[in-house]
Image (spheres, rainbow, N blue to C red):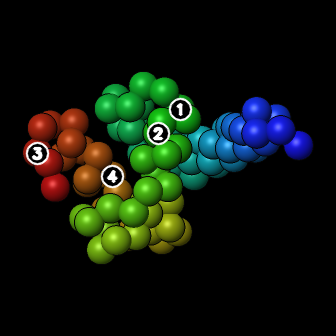
Amino acid sequence: MSLLKQTASHYRRQSRHYAKCIELLKFVDIKIYSLGREIITIDAALAVWLSTPKRALNGKAPLMVMKTSAGRMKVSEILTAIVHGILT
């Protein structure tokens, strides 16, 4: 398989993953989705942000922390701080 075909295949898989991630987020916590969209206006970019480890979450990705209500609250607090210009 050529590099171009491999790259296109990888991109399609990644895009499907991000779409599933965003659909799940909308279902689980619409508040976090809405806050995230205030900052990051593209769903795929929001999915990347949610999948990337954050120092404010002790090196864990927001999606991993959001498995608990306390984790969802922490992610919501981080997004609210960012919306108001308070970087964590």
Residue at which label 4 appears: 76
Quadrant of res 3:
top right
Q: Amino acid at mark 2?
A: Leu
| Extreme residue toward the top, this view | 41
Question: Which of the two discs, 2 and 4, labels the residue nearer the N terminus?
Answer: 2
Residue position marked by numbered label 3 in the rendering? 86
C-beta proximity under 8 Å, tags 2 and 4: no
Badge 3 amino acid: Ile
Are circles 2 and 1 on residues that touch, CB within 8 Å? yes
Asked if 66 appears above or below 32 in the picture, the reply is below
Q: Position of residue 61 (x, y in %)?
A: 43, 63
Cα–Cα span, label 4 and label 1? 17 Å
Residue 60, can we see it? yes
Label drawn at residue 46 = 2
Question: What label sits on residue 43 in the rendered view?
Answer: 1
Residue 66 shows up from this direction: no
Identity of the amino acid at label 4? Answer: Ser
* Contact flag, marks 1 and 3 (Cβ < 8 Å): no
Tell me the distance, in whole angstroms, between the alpha carbons under discs 1 and 3: 23 Å
